[in-house]
Image: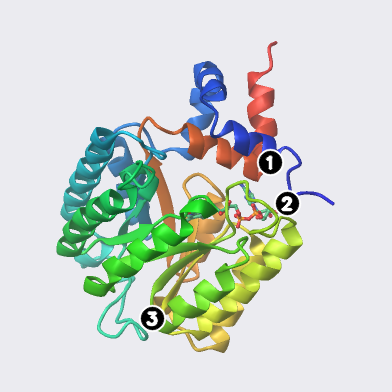
Amino acid sequence: TPVLTNPLRPALLAAARSPRAERGITRMPVTRRIVDRFVAGESREAALHAVRDLVRDNRFVTIDYLGEDTVDPAQADATVREYSAMIQALAQLPTPADDPGVPSTHGPGMLLAGTSPRPLEVSVKLSAFGQALPNDGHAVALRNASTVVEAAAAAGVWVTFDMEDHTTTDSTLSIVRELRRDHPETVGTVLQAYLRRTEDDCRAFADEGARIRLCKGAYNEPEAVAFRRKRDVDASYLRCLRILMQGKGYPMVATHDPAMIEAAALLATSVHRGRDDFEFQMLYGIRPAEQQRLTALGQHLRVYVPFGDQWYGYFVRRLAERPANLMFFLRSAAPG
Ligand code: FAD
């Protein structure tokens, strides 16, 4: 039975965490060109350029400053500073709603009383904020995350916490719950459908009225904690989707899978969710035509825009996801 869609997935996901593989792959001259398909650039300015284009095209955005697995407190501090600077820059951007010539894409939300979806968001990996530091990693990550959430709340920018491998899930969800106490509308989190625990997590967060980004999951997880066959992951995704759509929160449907997208649209209609009561999300550079199709239908579609020079782990997870991405990379890398 295939392990998800790609038999090379476990090997690639191991390479995503190997410094030796990183040195090899990042030095290949061809890599840069292919990385550019998935990453908006290395600088804040390059990311803002991509953001302006997307917002002008009526898409929502979430910005990710690339980096993960930090065990250096100074690097975690630098990451927090970059997020704070990015949030300030985002707050200065004109959104389509500010332009009287463009019809507003965000009316009053039905389920998040008094609020409407924010077009601008940042996505944060807690392992880049010091979560993996020995001894006090959890506390350091909470403090750093709190700094960013305060800045984002003041600027009207949302924050969603990415989900990493399963050893971090409890720590991440406890930080999310702590931050949601003061900022229930600003703070949301990712849940990964491939984890066996996620249906229960969806139920709890849907009851709390939380903003949840549901994705399939991108790490190499053991059978004991995760579904590993594509059809099991997909079935779990659909069960989770139903719980979130029927719940009190704001579901963010993060997938490129046509079957999941169609199911989400049908479920939303069946529970009378309007366009402001859920959204679709896709990664930068993946299925841009589908992104535009959903926006043209009047749905909210948010693009996850990664930037920065620490792109290696993110890039290799994208190769692991899809044999076609990997083949494209290998063909370009082949001599002659
Ligand atoms: P897949 O099962 O990979 O693909 C299903 C089908 O979708 C394919 O058969 C094909 O028909 C179509 N498809 C997929 N890619 C393409 C393509 N490039 N071109 C054309 N068709 C395509 N993972 C985490 O573990 N933690 C996170 O915090 C996280 N955050 C994410 C945030 C966002 C906004 C998104 C979109 C994904 C995130 N992911 C995260 C990654 C996610 O877990 C999956 O690894 C990734 O989205 C691939 O799964 P999929 O749902 O797109 O479907």
Q: Amino acid at mark 3?
A: Gly
Vertical placement of residue 220 versus 96, above or below? above
Q: Which residue is mark 2?
A: 4
Which label number is shown at residue 209? 3
The answer to which of 261 and 145 lies nearer the viewer is: 145
Marks 2 and 1 close (CB-CB < 8 Å): yes
Name which residue lies at 29% across and 68% down.
178
Q: Which residue is mark 1?
A: 9
CA gap, disc 1 and disc 3: 35 Å
| Residue 287, x across and y down, in percent | 57, 50
Q: Amino acid at mark 1?
A: Arg
Does the beta carbon at disc 2 come under 8 Å from ligand 1? yes
Name which residue lies at 56% across and 35% down.
316
Question: How many residues crowd mark 1 within 10 Å: few (<14), some (14–19), many (20+)?
Answer: many
Q: Amino acid at mark 2?
A: Leu
Under tag 3, what secondary structure? loop
Q: Quadrant of residue 30?
A: top right
Vertical placement of residue 300 versus 142, above or below? below
